Image (spheres, grey):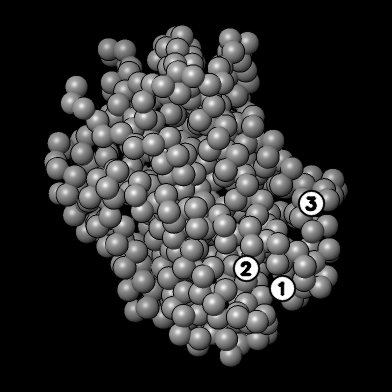
């Protein structure tokens, strides 16, 4: 087997793995789903699912990647027994990664546009939620602007991927993530000092058990999968890049803790500001583009803070895109044997085409409402990835790692426990084999 490129440091692995989530998974999507599902009770259920579902499935995906030294495109092929059909699951994972990037890159383009708006100061003239809502609406209704911003994200990220793991993806992601974390802490502290912030904190931190419903529970489970990028091979590829010196349970816990910290911090920024400036907490994707500008446009040095926040939001989004681009680049490498640069060119052209429907879904194709009135192409793409591909991929992965007719529990736990750090105990076998698959299926 040819030598596979490795991360240059453990920190690089943790930051890049968390980078799959930090951005749209946490800073963008977590506040939206928390607001839509009623606040603190959703957060409580989400954390429970991170522990009960997210960490066990992450260990499985990392183990499959490290043991096979391959992406999801061929990891099942390497580990399955002769005559088995587990490798068919790779098509679900590959398709899910492309589908995710078809709308992920569009939202990343939004972050770049808002950075420019703060850098040139043009957005500072708008002070009310209504005016800021109109700015956001004007932006997404411009098809040329949407396509250009999305294309810029795709071209930049595949250019970085073409330099390799250490010289490209790892080098860029590490300093972007550290800068983002520091800025988020500062913004969270400031947001909590706003007038009426206490009401926002109550909504976010004090559970209302009357909000217990099936959709809230399912939404929390889907967010746990989405935020950790589980079920589509995103973690498997990073597992293939790490050595055998550290156990995978400990590494999974570290990634989940960093991921949860960022999600929690994003809520501390958003919800006190919502109540301070009268923005509806369930206003959907525009929450980021109404609430935060409302803060920046009312404080001293708002242009500086706004520019910094959206440049680092861009960094966060780009780190996620880079992580998934690394996965699909590795998939094409494993399937074709092409060079990394050729794979990047192929995927770049393909995604330039595949991303266009989402870009046009808010303007030229706004009449197409696949999930009912008020929905768009992004909604159906997000629904397929979050509600179908991620849980189904995680279910198949869990069964593969625990069933005798799959990779088997002994092989799985042997890989997970290789190296220093936290160890998976054998008493977890019953939970992983019987309870966890049922929970995911339900």
Dot 3: few (<14), some (14–19), or many (≥20) neighbours within 10 Å?
some
Where is mark 1, residue-wise?
Answer: 279
At x 31%, y 23%, the residue is 68
- 186 shown above or below 326: below
Where is mark 3, residue-wise?
Answer: 205
Mark 2 secondary-structure assignment: helix
Label 2 to label 1: alpha-carbon separation? 8 Å
At x 47%, y 74%, the residue is 115
Quarter of the figure that contains the N terminus: top left
The one of 209 and 297 positioned closer to us in this rendering: 297
Asked whether disc 2 touches disc 1, contact meaning CB atoms under 8 Å apart, the reply is yes
Mark 3 secondary-structure assignment: helix
Q: In which quarter of the image is residue 285?
A: bottom right
Q: Quadrant of residue 66?
A: top left
At x 22%, y 59%, the residue is 349
- 359 shown above or below 339: below
How far from the left and from the top, in percent, is residue 387? 54, 45
> Is 133 left, or right, of 162 in this rendering?
right
> Is 349 left, or right, of 66 in this rendering?
left
Asked whether disc 2 touches disc 3, contact meaning CB atoms under 8 Å apart, the reply is no
Label 2 to label 3: alpha-carbon separation? 19 Å
> Is 64 left, or right, of 440 in this rendering?
left
Residue 118 visible in this rendered orientation of the protein: yes
Asked whether disc 3 touches disc 1, contact meaning CB atoms under 8 Å apart, the reply is no
**Which of marks 3 and 2 precedes in the sequence?**
3
């Amino acid at each position: 087997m040819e030598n596979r490129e490795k991360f240059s440091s453990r920190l690089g692995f943790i930051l890049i793995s968390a980078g799959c989530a930090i951005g749209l998974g946490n800073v963008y999507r977590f506040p939206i789903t928390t607001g839509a599902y009623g606040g603190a009770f959703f957060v409580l259920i989400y954390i429970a699912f991170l522990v009960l579902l997210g960490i066990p499935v992450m260990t499985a995906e990392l183990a499959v990647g490290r043991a096979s030294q391959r992406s999801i495109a061929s990891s099942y092929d390497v580990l399955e027994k002769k005559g088995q059909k587990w490798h068919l699951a790779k098509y679900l994972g590959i398709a899910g990664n492309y589908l995710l990037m078809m709308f992920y890159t569009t939202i990343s383009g939004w972050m770049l546009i808002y950075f420019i708006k703060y850098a040139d100061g043009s957005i500072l003239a708008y002070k009310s939620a209504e005016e800021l809502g109109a700015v956001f609406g004007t932006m997404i209704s411009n098809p040329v602007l949407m396509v250009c911003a999305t294309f810029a994200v795709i071209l930049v990220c595949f250019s970085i991927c073409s330099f390799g793991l250490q010289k490209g993806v790892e080098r860029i992601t590490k300093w972007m993530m550290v800068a983002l974390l520091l800025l988020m802490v500062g913004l969270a502290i400031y947001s909590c000092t706003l007038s009426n912030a206490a009401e926002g904190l109550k909504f976010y931190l004090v559970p209302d058990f009357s909000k217990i419903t099936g959709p809230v529970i399912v939404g929390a489970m889907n967010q746990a999968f989405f935020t950790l990028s589980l079920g589509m091979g995103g973690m498997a590829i990073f597992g293939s890049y790490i050595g055998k010196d550290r156990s995978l349970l400990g590494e999974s816990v570290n990634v989940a803790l960093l991921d949860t910290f960022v999600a929690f911090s994003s809520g501390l920024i958003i919800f006190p500001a919502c109540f301070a400036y009268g923005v509806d907490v369930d206003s959907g994707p525009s929450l980021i583009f109404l609430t935060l500008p409302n803060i920046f446009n009312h404080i001293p040095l708002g242009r500086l803070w706004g520019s910094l926040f959206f440049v680092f939001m861009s960094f966060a989004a780009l780190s996620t895109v880079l992580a998934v681009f690394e996965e699909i680049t590795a998939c094409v490498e494993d399937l074709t044997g092409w060079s990394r640069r050729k794979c990047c060119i192929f995927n770049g052209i393909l995604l330039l085409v595949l991303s266009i429907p989402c870009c046009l879904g808010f303007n030229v194709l706004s009449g197409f409402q696949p999930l009912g009135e008020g929905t768009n192409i992004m909604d159906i793409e997000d629904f397929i990835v979050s509600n179908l591909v991620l849980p189904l991929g995680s279910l198949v992965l869990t069964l593969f790692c625990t069933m005798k007719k799959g990779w088997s529990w002994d092989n799985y736990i042997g890989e997970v426990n290789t190296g220093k750090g936290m160890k998976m105990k054998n008493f977890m076998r019953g939970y992983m084999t019987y309870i966890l698959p049922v929970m995911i299926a339900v």
